[in-house]
Image (tube, grey):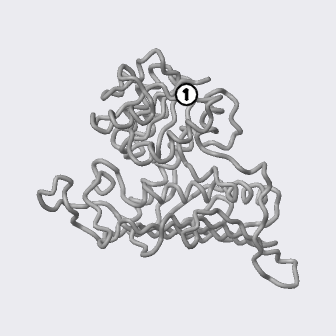
Amino acid sequence: MLRVGSIGLGGVSHGGHIPGIFSCPDLLKLTAICDIDPVRLKERAEEYGIPEDHCFTCYRDLIDCPDVDVIDISTPNDVHAEIAEYAAKAGKPYGLEKPITLNEKEAKHLYDVTKESGVLNMIYFSYRYKAAARYAKALIAEGKLGRIYHVNAQYYQAWGLPLADRPLVWRFVKKRTGTGVLGDLGCHIMDLTAFITGEWYTKVLSHLTTFVHERKLLDGSGMGRADVDDHADVLAEMDGGASAAFEISRVATGRGNYQRIEIYGDFGALLYKLDENGSGKDVLEFMDNSAEKKVFTELPIPEEYFADQMPSYGKLMAGCGDGLNATIEDGLRNQRLMDAVVRSADEGHWVKIE
């Protein structure tokens, strides 16, 4: 039984991490929580049954708590690095939301501290736990597609549209988040594509667009500047030779949490889909190039490919992960990729991934 301390109690935590912790009571137990908002902290404490002396407004106090074995971090991006660094130096394993930092320099420092400490760690690239994605990865590794020629991927949401009337939360403020939709959704879909194909990126060409430049301030006192991207287009070359194209948006009307990855190879093609028509379901389709009729057919997914993020976090923290979880190495590599995408958009040319 691992005793978990969760830092940051917003939507990602409340809607995903903590329900996931409660889903595996034989492995994880929530023993302490932390949030800078005392009202939210009190509400969550009552809901989760956490005693007052295990509720903290300072992350250091939670990490130092002797009743906490492992740390769960789901705060805004600008404090990821300092919290994870403090956990690593305290010798406590951690799970960290993505992107891991605001830029590659911060990410490299966190990587170095984490490796020096030797603590177990996990980066929450949550779509690696979709059964359709894991099955697709296995089929490609088996050679079902042969050589991969190109990948087309989309990740669309609609909550950033003007008509959605979202206020100026931290995700729209560069100094808090680093990038907009690129770091919020783009890092997910680019990690997932690499996870499935087994290939990484060698260079990128990108275009970032901000459509909504002002949003209501949270206190209702007026309007504030939104200075991050709402939409991203990225072309990429992969190290196996494949060409990839990504479209990423928070202003895609009618979309909830829609993902689509098309992968085309010598012997066939795979189509991964998530949340098509608002179903929330992940689906995998295959087209066999040797068949008489070249049609995509939905594949039944074997039970062995089903997984969940927080139980996987628990297993990794207990030292028995399956090798498919993202770690600090993946977090650094992804941050380096995001920085290259931003540089390409700023400078208007292809950028090599170092």
Q: Residues within 10 Å of mark 1 (few under 14, many from 20)?
A: many
Is 156 drawn above or below residue 44 in the view shown? Answer: below
Query: In the displayed structure, does residue 304 sit left or right of residue 85?
Result: right
Q: Nearer the viewer, residue 196 or 207?
A: 196
Instruction: Classify 106 as above or below 27.
Output: below
In the image, taking residue 221 as reference, residue 209 lies left or right, namely: right
Q: Residue furthest top?
A: 66
Looking at the picture, how far across and down is residue 225, in whole percent?
A: 20, 61
Q: Is residue 173 left or right of residue 301?
A: left
Residue at horizontal 36%, vertical 58%?
A: 180
Q: Amino acid at mark 1?
A: Lys
The quarter of the picture where the N terminus appears is: top right
Residue visible at 51% across and 28% down in the picture:
4
Q: Picture coordinates of residue 208 (x, y %)? A: 38, 67
Q: Residue 304, position in %: x, y?
A: 78, 48
- Measuring from the top left, give residue 82's x and y in whole percent: 37, 32
| Residue in view at x 34 percent, y 26 percent | 56
Quarter residue 260 falls in = bottom right
Kindly identify which residue carries mark 1: 29
How many numbered marks appear?
1
Q: Which of the two residues, 44 or 143, is positioned nearer the viewer here?
A: 44
> SS of the residue at dot 1?
strand
The residue sitting at 45% across, 21% down in the picture is: 89
Kindly indicate the quadrant of the structure image that contains residue 166: bottom left
Between residues 297 and 232, which one lies in front from this camera angle? Answer: 297
Residue at the extreme left of the image, as rendered: 221
The residue positioned farthest toward the bottom in the image shown: 293
Residue 305 visible in image: yes
* Residue 349 is at least partly visible in this image: no
Q: Quadrant of residue 21?
A: top right
Closest to the observer, 330 or 160: 160
